[in-house]
Image (tube, rainbow, N blue to C red):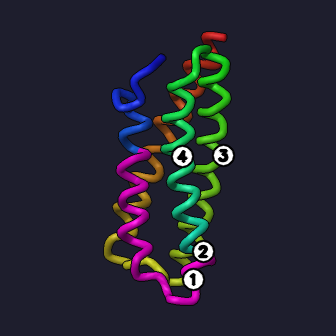
Amino acid sequence: MRDHRSLKAYQLADKLCLMIYIETKTFPKDETFGLRSQIRRAAVSVVSDITEGCGRNTDADFLRFLDMAFGSIRELEYQVSLGKRLNYFNMERIEDLELILEETIRVLRGLIDSFRNKL
Protein backbone atom coordinates (compact mmCIF):
# COMPACT_ATOMS: atom_id res chain seq x y z
CA MET A 1 0.00 0.00 0.00
CA ARG A 2 1.32 3.43 -0.96
CA ASP A 3 1.10 6.70 0.95
CA HIS A 4 -0.81 8.98 -1.39
CA ARG A 5 0.35 12.07 0.48
CA SER A 6 3.94 11.46 -0.58
CA LEU A 7 3.11 11.52 -4.30
CA LYS A 8 3.73 14.78 -6.13
CA ALA A 9 0.73 14.01 -8.38
CA TYR A 10 -1.51 13.83 -5.31
CA GLN A 11 -0.07 17.02 -3.81
CA LEU A 12 -0.63 18.95 -7.03
CA ALA A 13 -4.10 17.51 -7.59
CA ASP A 14 -5.07 18.41 -4.03
CA LYS A 15 -3.82 21.98 -4.49
CA LEU A 16 -5.67 22.19 -7.79
CA CYS A 17 -8.88 20.92 -6.19
CA LEU A 18 -8.71 23.58 -3.47
CA MET A 19 -8.09 26.27 -6.09
CA ILE A 20 -11.05 25.04 -8.13
CA TYR A 21 -13.38 25.29 -5.15
CA ILE A 22 -12.20 28.82 -4.37
CA GLU A 23 -12.31 30.05 -7.95
CA THR A 24 -15.73 28.59 -8.76
CA LYS A 25 -17.41 30.35 -5.82
CA THR A 26 -17.98 33.37 -8.04
CA PHE A 27 -19.61 31.46 -10.91
CA PRO A 28 -23.08 32.71 -11.88
CA LYS A 29 -25.92 31.46 -9.70
CA ASP A 30 -27.49 29.59 -12.62
CA GLU A 31 -24.32 27.47 -12.88
CA THR A 32 -24.63 26.10 -9.34
CA PHE A 33 -25.81 22.74 -10.67
CA GLY A 34 -24.22 23.09 -14.09
CA LEU A 35 -20.62 23.80 -15.01
CA ARG A 36 -19.57 24.74 -11.48
CA SER A 37 -20.74 21.39 -10.16
CA GLN A 38 -19.10 19.50 -13.04
CA ILE A 39 -15.77 21.26 -12.54
CA ARG A 40 -15.77 20.55 -8.84
CA ARG A 41 -16.69 16.90 -9.32
CA ALA A 42 -13.91 16.39 -11.87
CA ALA A 43 -11.34 18.04 -9.57
CA VAL A 44 -12.39 15.90 -6.60
CA SER A 45 -12.37 12.80 -8.81
CA VAL A 46 -8.71 13.32 -9.75
CA VAL A 47 -7.58 13.44 -6.13
CA SER A 48 -9.95 10.66 -5.07
CA ASP A 49 -8.81 8.26 -7.79
CA ILE A 50 -5.15 8.82 -6.96
CA THR A 51 -5.92 8.23 -3.28
CA GLU A 52 -8.03 5.13 -3.92
CA GLY A 53 -5.41 3.70 -6.27
CA CYS A 54 -2.80 4.02 -3.53
CA GLY A 55 -4.98 1.85 -1.34
CA ARG A 56 -4.92 -1.01 -3.85
CA ASN A 57 -2.52 -3.93 -3.52
CA THR A 58 -1.19 -4.32 -7.05
CA ASP A 59 0.56 -2.02 -9.48
CA ALA A 60 -2.04 -2.96 -12.12
CA ASP A 61 -4.88 -1.78 -9.86
CA PHE A 62 -2.96 1.38 -8.99
CA LEU A 63 -2.40 2.08 -12.68
CA ARG A 64 -6.10 1.58 -13.44
CA PHE A 65 -7.03 4.28 -10.90
CA LEU A 66 -4.31 6.58 -12.20
CA ASP A 67 -5.79 6.16 -15.68
CA MET A 68 -9.21 7.16 -14.32
CA ALA A 69 -7.64 10.18 -12.62
CA PHE A 70 -6.03 11.15 -15.92
CA GLY A 71 -9.38 10.96 -17.70
CA SER A 72 -10.88 13.21 -15.04
CA ILE A 73 -8.11 15.75 -15.27
CA ARG A 74 -8.53 15.97 -19.03
CA GLU A 75 -12.24 16.50 -18.48
CA LEU A 76 -11.37 19.23 -15.96
CA GLU A 77 -8.98 20.81 -18.45
CA TYR A 78 -11.82 21.27 -20.94
CA GLN A 79 -14.24 22.51 -18.31
CA VAL A 80 -11.77 25.14 -17.08
CA SER A 81 -11.22 26.22 -20.67
CA LEU A 82 -14.98 26.55 -21.19
CA GLY A 83 -15.41 28.50 -17.95
CA LYS A 84 -12.60 30.81 -18.98
CA ARG A 85 -14.14 31.45 -22.40
CA LEU A 86 -17.48 32.19 -20.72
CA ASN A 87 -15.66 34.68 -18.43
CA TYR A 88 -16.73 32.83 -15.30
CA PHE A 89 -13.25 32.87 -13.76
CA ASN A 90 -11.40 35.81 -12.28
CA MET A 91 -9.11 36.63 -15.20
CA GLU A 92 -6.37 37.88 -12.87
CA ARG A 93 -6.07 34.46 -11.19
CA ILE A 94 -6.92 32.03 -13.99
CA GLU A 95 -3.28 31.85 -15.13
CA ASP A 96 -2.21 30.43 -11.75
CA LEU A 97 -4.97 27.85 -11.94
CA GLU A 98 -4.01 26.88 -15.49
CA LEU A 99 -0.34 26.53 -14.52
CA ILE A 100 -1.19 24.15 -11.67
CA LEU A 101 -3.55 22.26 -13.97
CA GLU A 102 -0.84 21.84 -16.63
CA GLU A 103 1.76 20.79 -14.06
CA THR A 104 -0.64 18.26 -12.53
CA ILE A 105 -1.36 16.78 -15.97
CA ARG A 106 2.37 16.50 -16.70
CA VAL A 107 3.27 14.91 -13.35
CA LEU A 108 0.32 12.50 -13.43
CA ARG A 109 1.20 11.47 -17.01
CA GLY A 110 4.79 10.81 -15.87
CA LEU A 111 3.61 8.71 -12.94
CA ILE A 112 1.34 6.69 -15.23
CA ASP A 113 4.12 6.15 -17.75
CA SER A 114 6.56 5.02 -15.07
CA PHE A 115 4.12 2.41 -13.73
CA ARG A 116 3.07 1.28 -17.18
CA ASN A 117 6.74 0.63 -18.00
CA LYS A 118 7.05 -1.53 -14.87
CA LEU A 119 4.19 -3.83 -15.91
At horizontal 55% and vertical 65% (from top left) the residue drawn is 39
Asked if the residues shown at circle 3 and circle 2 are in contact, with their CB atoms under 8 angstroms apart, the answer is no
Pointer 1: what residue?
31
- Give the spatial CA distance, label 2 vs label 1: 6 Å
Q: Closer to the N terminus: mark 4 or mark 2?
A: 2
At horizontal 40% and vertical 55% (from top left) the residue drawn is 99
**Residue farthest along the top direction in this orientation:** 118
Magenta residues?
A: 13-35
Residue 27 magenta: yes
Would residue 16 be found to the left or right of residue 79 on screen?
A: left
Tell me the crowding category of disc 4: few under 14, some 14 to 19, or many 20 or more residues within 10 angstroms, Cα based: many
Q: Position of residue 6 (x, y in %)?
A: 34, 27
Instruction: Indicate the secondary structure of the residue bearing disc 1.
Output: helix
Callout 2 amino acid = Leu
Callout 3 amino acid = Gly
Q: Position of residue 80 (x, y in %)?
A: 54, 66
93 versus 110 height, above or below: below
Pointer 2: what residue?
35
Q: Closer to the N terminus: mark 4 or mark 1?
A: 1
Q: Nearer the viewer, mark 3 or mark 4?
A: 4
Residue 71 magenta: no
User: Of residues 114 and 24, which is closer to you in this image?
Assistant: 24
Q: Closer to the N terminus: mark 1 or mark 3?
A: 1
Q: Which mark is residue 71?
A: 3
Asked if the residues shown at circle 1 and circle 3 are in contact, with their CB atoms under 8 angstroms apart, the answer is no
